Amino acid sequence: MSTTLCPPGAAGVAAVDRTRPVLTVRLDAVAHNTRLLAGSARRLMAVVKADGFGLGAVDVARTALGNGADALGVATLTEAVELRLAGVDAPLLSWLDAPGADLSDAVLHGVDVAVPSVAHLDAAVAAARRLGRVVHVHLYLDCGAARDGCPPELWPGLCTAARRAEVAGTVRVGGVMGHLACAAGLDVEANAAATVRFVRGVEHAHAAGLRPALRHLGATAAVLGLPAARFDLSRVGAGLVGIDPTGRFPVLRAAAQVTAPVVQVRDVGAGVGVGYDHTYVTTAPTRLALLPLGYADGLPVTASGRAEVLVHGRRRPLAGRVSMDQVVVDVGDLSVRPGDVVTVIGTGDDAAPTLTEWAGWAGTLPHELLTGLGRRLVRRVVPAPPTSRPSALEEHP
């Protein structure tokens, strides 16, 4: 995988390479999204797990921090250490480490860790004692997803144990966190029970003698239009890269574009089967264009038979199945030659299909597609402009 910088601005971005498939990472879009979201959050944690949703954790983290984010979040301590080794020194939380894991790196690199159980707390205490330092933790409550987080019936015991560790001087509880089971929606009623459970969890922490400075429950959707779930800090990942899980805020800008060159063109007659098992058969004479990318590069096989791409300003269908390394496009009567650049996934600035459309064709989430874009794609990075002040989103009615 190679990475180069290209100038800001949409013009010319799609045609940066006429020989290889290209993923263009729009850090200018990340900057724009961060400013908007930070303007509507009390504090903003930029979640850059899964390599910054596939767009480069270090680049996305630095861009977000320069445009209004106050802290960073990742899934694992390994991801956190990678950021520290790259010189990123902002407040940083890792929240999905396994119980009993060696948390020494958290202590050494100043990384906060989430604690959803006494076993996690014991691991944090052990690391702090080995190194003779204090480890900072966020107690993590299950607010209704029955997934990660401490079950409510075990929460009082966890709070009591955390307070003992604070008194012993090994742990500092800096936050209480939860997660909404209906995190992608704006339905206040659907999230009410989780919010109540979270508030009660904070009260239990206070009753145990803890005084966490940060309470955080909501993610991107909460910042966009669910004020009751914002609290002191909001964790935003998808929104940074332009994914609106609610589908109701077009102000976010997509941060990824995929283009590919035509490498072969052939004219065929009616009745020609295309690709494996001939799932596509031409109904009339037409022109077929071959693109050198496939499911190994992140295009979902499940989008076969539905997906489209943009060729010379017109949408044209994929012909046949998405293969590992290539796809065929039925370009009809368009004048297409090898070297012409096709927009596979667009940013919404033109008629090209967006990441959200591809997710619909594949029956999945845009998050999955974005994080799955392959390392074989050449990367072009559009840098962010100079930083500017956050501006609040208008509340959705």
Image: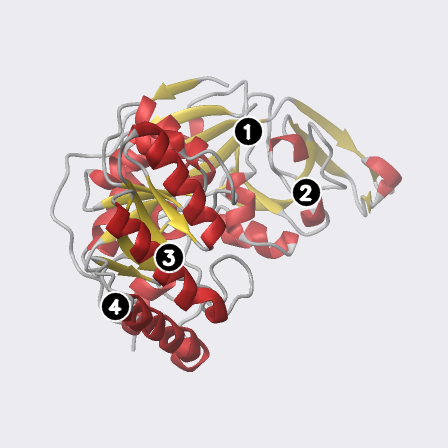
Question: What distance separates the C-alpha of mark 2 from that of mark 4?
Answer: 58 Å
Q: Tag 3's secondary structure? A: helix
Q: Which residue is mark 4?
A: 206
Q: Tag 4's secondary structure? A: helix
Q: Please give the label number shown on residue 161.
A: 3
Horizontal placement of 310 versus 112: left or right?
right
Q: Amino acid at mark 3?
A: Ala
Q: Visible in this render: residue 25?
A: no
- Of residues 164 and 38, which is closer to you in this image? 164
Q: Tag 2's secondary structure? A: loop
Q: Amino acid at mark 4?
A: His
Say which residue appears at 51% left-offset and 53% top-offset.
356
Coordinates of residue 262 in the picture (x, y in percent): 60, 26
Q: Label 3: few (<14), some or many (≥20) within 10 Å?
A: some
Coordinates of residue 304 in the picture (x, y in percent): 71, 46
Q: Which residue is mark 2?
A: 318
Q: Which residue is mark 1?
A: 260
Q: Amino acid at mark 2?
A: Leu
Mark earlier in primary sequence (2, 3): 3
Q: Are marks 4 and 1 in contact (CB under 8 Å)?
A: no
Mark earlier in primary sequence (4, 1): 4
Front label number (3 vs 4): 3
